[in-house]
Amino acid sequence: MSKLDDAQKTELHLLDAALSLHHEQANKPGAAFMHCQECGIDIPKQRRDAVKNCSTCVECQSLIEIQQQHYRA
């Protein structure tokens, strides 16, 4: 295994850990965000009502999910 392979595995591990921590913090009871934690725009009330403890707007959440699919492939 090359150093590049090791570096990529380490990067993926750190990314997974950061995403897990982010999701844990966002899903704590009472964690209500008025603004997206990624881009800072207001999260519409309908989204906040529909998705308990959401911390991102629809656009940012879509990008996060696309990135997660890319890294898990």
Image (cartoon, grey):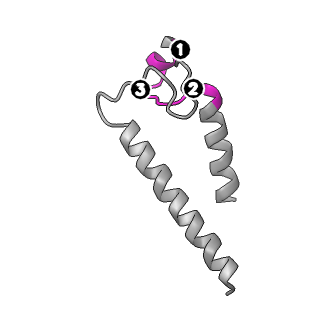
**Where 47 falls versus 72 (above or below)?**
above
| Label at residue 6 | none
- Callout 3 amino acid: Lys
Marks 1 and 2 close (CB-CB < 8 Å) = yes
User: CA separation, marks 2 and 3?
Assistant: 13 Å
Q: Position of residue 64 (x, y in %)?
A: 61, 41
Q: Say whether residue 38 is left or right of residue 59.
A: left
| Earlier residue among tags 1 and 2 | 1
Q: Does the magenta stretch include residue 19?
A: no
Residue visible at 34% across and 29% down in the picture: 31
Marks 2 and 3 close (CB-CB < 8 Å) = no
Residue visible at 54% across and 57% down in the picture: 15
Q: Nearer the viewer, mark 2 or mark 3?
A: 2
Residue visible at 47% across and 30% down in the picture: 55
Q: Name the residue at the top extreme.
A: 45
| Label at residue 52 | 3
- Callout 2 amino acid: Cys
* Residue of label 2: 57
Secondary structure category for the residue under label 1: loop
Q: Nearer the viewer, residue 6 or 70?
A: 6
What crowding class fits label 3: few (fewer than 14 Cα within 10 Å), some (14-19), or many (20 or more)?
some
| Earlier residue among tags 1 and 3 | 1
Secondary structure category for the residue under label 3: loop
* Residue of label 1: 44
**Where 70 falls versus 34 (above or below)?**
below
